[in-house]
Image: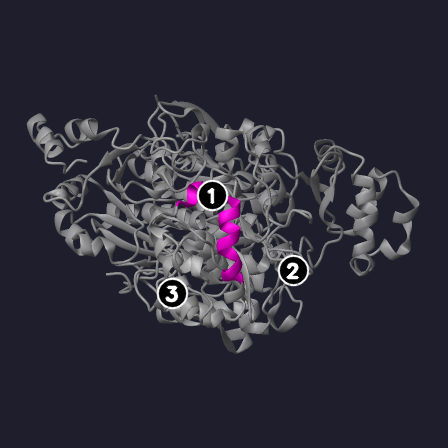
Amino acid sequence: MDKQALDGLKVVEFAAYAAGPVTGKYLADFGATVIHLESGSRPDGFRLQYPPFAKNKPGVNRSGTFAVCNNNKYGITIDLKAPGGVELAKRVVAWADVVIENFTPGTMDRLGLGYKELSRVNNRLIMLSTCNQGQDGPHASHPGFGSQLTSLSGFTFLTGFPDGPLSLLFGPYIDFIGVGYGVIAVMAALDHRRRTGEGQYIDLAQYENGVQFLAQVVLDYNVNGRALSRMGNRCDFAAPHGVYPCQGEDRWCALSVFDDDEWLELQQIMGNPAWAADPGFGTLIGRKQHEGELDERLSQWTVQFAPEELMQTLQNGGIRAGILNRVRDVYTDPQYEHRRIWRGMEHPEMGVFHYQAPPFELESTPAVLDRPSPCLGEHNEYFFCQILQLEEEEYRKLVETRVIA
Amino acid sequence: MAGSQGGKGLLEGYRVLDLTDQVGWLAGKIMGDLGADVIKIERPGGDPGRNVGPFYQDIPDPEKSLTWWAYNNNKRGITLDITTVTGATLFKQLASKADFVFESFTPGFLAGLGLSYSDLSRENPALILTSVTPFGQTGPYSGYQASDLELMATSGVMALFGSPDRPPVRVSSPQSYMWAGMSAAMGALIANFHRALTGQGQHVDVSAQASILWAITPAQTHWDLLQKDLSRDGEFITGRSVTGAKMRAIYRCRDGFINFIVYGGAAGKATNKALVQWMNEDGMAPQFLLEKDWDNFNIATVSQEEIDQIEKPIEAFLKTKTKADFFREAIKRRMLGYPVSSAQDIISDPQLQVRGFWTEVQHPELGTSITYPGGFGKFSGAWCGVSRRAPLIGEDNMEVFKGELGLTSTEVIRLKQAGVI
């Protein structure tokens, strides 16, 4: 096998749920050795609290939510509350280049595993703390989940039709923004360490990461005093611009027209219906003024087609259009298939599960997804004996005394 | 420790050329936030993305687009028509000394100008070229055009946004471009790690469509494991109980909305107890909630009937509170949940203020400074933030063409007259 981009990089996660583990997953996909460290008695919350479970039967090794966040990692368990647990964890940290943690601020310090302590063990350590609010400030220690932080940071307020209810963005949307910035911060810190020999402590607030994605909305408020609110699928400078019904139940196709040439092209594709020739629709200003009627007329045309067919017809004519993929469709979308987004792997308790490859490809050193998510503590013996190279006898003793547990 | 920021960024010393349009802007900005020297290269007359509003004081002007400002700060700016032989040659010279190039043209466009990855890497084998496009460099959709709306639709995420009785809906501020730009910076920096060890650059191929897909995790796994196709449910959160029960997530309050969810797990149980306690202080906790055995409450197996019964009095209670009431008590009582914030609420959040998140950025030509979101993170030994506003059109032409490429003033003026810059 060709060398991978991150071969040789060693990472340990004191992390659970989404933001910490998916950061580690990206590094693992590109070849880093990533250890997912859990406690056997209090495992990663995704293992038990979040469906789906294989065959709808809960179990620590049956969660799809845990699986999708953790392929290509080694799973180990240490009881950090047991005498000797913290000492053992420090030996793992001494081995690692990078620590990723996403506990509520203060937790690692209380465990005796704060950055100060860990940098004493490993003075070149790069430690990423990613949490909701950041490590300091009046709300730092407030516990929270991404599904709710997504509302605090402005996304929910901007989602929905103006005359209808708001919509949740399904789940922990903002966690995955934190993931991207986490990977970026760690990679930049590693490069800096290579050049200077210095370790780094990184404090990411997912709240502050999320606001980056709404920067112009914030600027609009600061400069113009305007707090943008939800506008459905409308766009200020395009019409039509929306999702339109297609053949079948709850099937849709998105399309948008940004200039008059595109509007003429769309008319032609529709077979130049009389309504579309109405001069009221001839200009952008007219189309915006009569956008409700325009949407209604257009819907009567789009509903005759399957969404795949409509997308292709419009794209062939140079009109931006896109099928609204249902969640099930993401597994068969031809472009995702081409990019090999899904990698099926046999998991010992779940059967074949489709793991998700990164959205970017490194052409000379591509992502390799070749190991399923670990069962709880699956790699204890392998990691401690082969990688950390503890003596067999010491390992046995740590298992007997329930430090490795 | 975090917060004590040094003067230099982690990527100090790297040179980045940014040829992207809106789909890739964020990548170069992130590199700049980390201290790299980023040169935004626009076509003569300026990037068409400068025409995207909102605008400073609502004055539509390519030098006043807030969207442009938001994602092109921390960059220097030059103009260069790379479709001319002269422009392409100058670009090649810049690329021969650069560490990273980001671009977002239709796949094949750069190759047509003799500026493909293999053309550029011949001169500079260490170069990392990152291409950010709607669907990626190859594949059945690679020639398709898409704006944010089509990307949100084709990615699959929009299927989960909106109410069941209305069409699926996007976020009213484009998100797919942000995800794509972030992916591009991730890919480029992972490639950089490899380059540091081997001296070899490479081509990184980013798909905006696939970048957004992560945003709905773990919805996809419900299909993969159970062939259960989750769909949009507006104010409710779905997929949290094996019974299929859904929980309300958006509650009305006196002056807007609150995101509160009946959760399980340690934090959820503590929250449920704290809320009932608060309700009881107002005389609004029904007996069955006061007596509920939260320690044995399991959200992963809860039924719809039980959830509905729990939520009803919570709805009535939260209606009597303001967003600020809820936020204050949620912090004080360590309850999960937050208000549904607008831009105004975010600006006035004390947490972001105390963290020093907001940054004043000078706009000398307007005689003012403007408050921007600051750095995306805090580093113990390095600076991360916004140090300069987005460039004016061609603002750094002289500096770059003379200073970096060694042209004379006469030659730069000649290029301007020929329309190359």
User: Counting other residues with Cα less than 10 Å from the Cα at mark 1, is it few (<14), some (14-19), or many (20 or more)?
Assistant: many
The answer for which chain carries disc 3 is B
Residue under pointer 1:
B240
Q: Is residue A217 among the parts visible in the rendering?
A: yes
The foreground one among A183 and B256 is: B256
Is residue B307 within the magenta segment? yes
Q: Chain of mark 2?
A: B
State which quadrant residue A401 falls in. top left
Task: Work out whether residue A185 or residue A230 is closer to the camera in this orientation and state it.
Answer: A230
Do dots 1 and 2 share one subunit? yes
Q: Secondary structure at mark 3?
A: helix
Q: Are marks 1 and 3 in contact (CB under 8 Å)?
A: no
- Image quarter in which the C terminus of chain B is found: bottom right
The numbered disc on residue B277 is 3
Q: Secondary structure at mark 2?
A: helix
C-alpha span from label 1 to label 2: 43 Å
The magenta-colored residue range is: B298-315
Residue A349 drawn in magenta: no
Instruction: Give the residue displayed 46% in from the left and 56% down from the top.
Output: A148
Residue B282: quadrant of the picture = bottom left
- Which residue shows up at 51% across the image and 65% down it? B341
The residue furthest bottom is B367
